[in-house]
Image: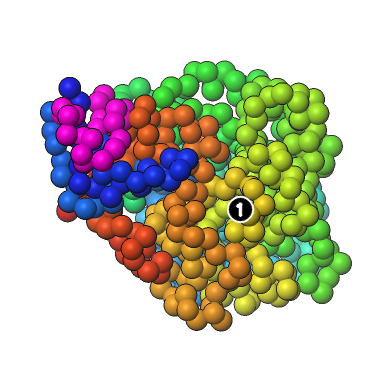
Amino acid sequence: MNDVLYKNGQIYTVDDSRSWAEAVAVKDGRITFVGSNEDAKGIEAAEVIDLDGKMLLPGFIEAHGHVTWGAIDSLFKISLFGAEDAQYYIDTIKKFVADNPDLPVYEGAGWENPFFGPEGPSRKILDEICSDRPMLMWSHDKHSVWVNTHVLELCGIDKDTTVPAGNVIEREPDGTPGGTLREFAAIALIDSVRPVFTKEHYKKAVDWIQRDLARHGVTAILDPVLDPEEEAIAAIKELNENGELICKLRGAFKSSEIDSYKHIDDFPKIRDAVDSHMFKIDQVKIFADGVVEGKTAYLKQPYEGETYTGDPIWEPEHLNEFCKKVDELGFDIHVHAIGDAAVAMTLDAIDAAKTADPDRDRRPVITHLQIVDPADYHRLADHKVAVVTNPYWHFKYRGFFEDIEVPYLGERAYHEYPMKSMQDAGIILGGASDYNVTPIPAPLRGIQIGATRVGIDEDPNDMELVLAPEERMSVEDMVEVFTKGNAYSMRMDDITGSVEVGKCADFVILEKNIFEVPPEDIYKVKVVQTISEGKVIYEAE
Ligand SMILES: [Zn+2]
């Protein structure tokens, strides 16, 4: 006897032939039957649910979302997301400080570069709000931190302080640090003043975000930066052991080029200690470069009008050795690469690992890929790299596109964030919000923008607005990106990512068939129910 039989649905299975079904049966959290209403007649179930024509899909998957630090930002820091101008930051921080006058440290997150000059926001703005306690404000993409003078003094950052290539201490004309630090090695200088979050903070944060994800139909997500020095891993493990993890969680360990081997022996131990159906850590995150807006992305051709190409964060030899080591330990690499030179350098590192061990079933992940040299497409395909794109960003973001991307990248900006051309080259595509760089991790939003390549409220028929129209994906292909494609990149394709007998009953039920609405209305389609392991984890009111 099955637990549930769903019938009368428009069930898009995302199996290899992208077949449709009308009914699906579930027992003990697993799918036992997929077929027509007619074939379902003999199926017995304790409960029969009439889908009444609604659409049922495999639960959506996010292959790169900062579950832990994103939720910590939302619950425990000053939120600077969603500003219209720089004044908003000042007003928000001032109000928070006035409301919380006794905090020993003020930490915030979410400011964006376009509201400031290329040198980033100034320490002096924060000094005027509070000068006797540390203030540190993360940019929305976590690649920069804005601090007050007190932090610079406490951490001994002055005119003489230097950082490795690829990292930046922004400076005033006389060389005094101006208050903005970019990339990990520069940001690491202020580690000693950062507030420490406890396991209880992380448990609360993860529980909160997994419920939010469920609202958007997400049943699995990968956190790309789990730090062995933080309580995040212990918190997720405990939630899992208590049966409180409702969303499958996969993770990548944080690594850094500075002390790259510091935790290398711990990685396998922690992996084995947490390894379970709902929670696994089997990737290692590597930052190959920075971001275009900080001019820290590593490009093959110089930034527009300059001779500077940006620097790689890792020396190529060092990266090759590290990737080989990670590979030997049985992990997949998960590499942040924004510029085309960073992508190529990562492919060289994969070559090195492959030369050392040609037969390993490796699934390297490269994410973001703002600029990719088409000459590298065949390498991405041959290595079966899971390319985790960020379709949520694939439009001409107002303020960003004209003021930063075009001036910095020139012609390249008009072809940035390729997708369709990579798919046509046989590359395996995944997709992600990079939550909380994207504040709302709703795959229907990513699917819509991937198909239209305009902003969520913009008209896709206005070709002026469309970012690289030749890179538009079909809605079917976008659905595959957020289900099967991501399942591949997270090594979950044997248990989820499609509606097939034997897989987990991870579903999202939508009020209507998204293939029957115009692509620009996909995000308006309501998530009616989200089901994980056969249990309802979200139900619309
Ligand atoms: Zn990220």
Which kind of residue does numbered mark 1 sit on?
Gln
Q: Is residue 32 magenta?
A: yes
Give how far across and how far down residue 80 sits, in percent: 46, 62
537 vs 337, left or right, is left
Residue 200 shows in this picture = no
The magenta-colored residue range is: 25-45
Viewer-side residue, 174 vs 439: 439
Residue 3 figure quarter? top left
Identity of the residue furthest to the front in this view: 38
Q: Which residue is mark 1?
A: 423
State the residue at coordinates (68%, 62%). 292
State the residue at coordinates (65%, 41%). 385
Give how far across and how far down residue 451 sits, in percent: 49, 63
Viewer-side residue, 293 vs 402: 402
Asked if ligand 1 lies within 8 A of label 1, the reply is no
Q: Is residue 101 above or below residue 325?
A: below
Viewer-side residue, 91 vs 525: 525
Give how far across and how far down residue 302 sits, in percent: 82, 65
Give how far across and how far down residue 145 sits, in percent: 60, 55
Circle 1 packing at 10 Å, graded few (<14), some (14-19), many (20+), is some
Viewer-side residue, 527 vs 518: 518
State the residue at coordinates (15%, 45%). 50
Quadrant location of the N terminus in the rendered image = top left
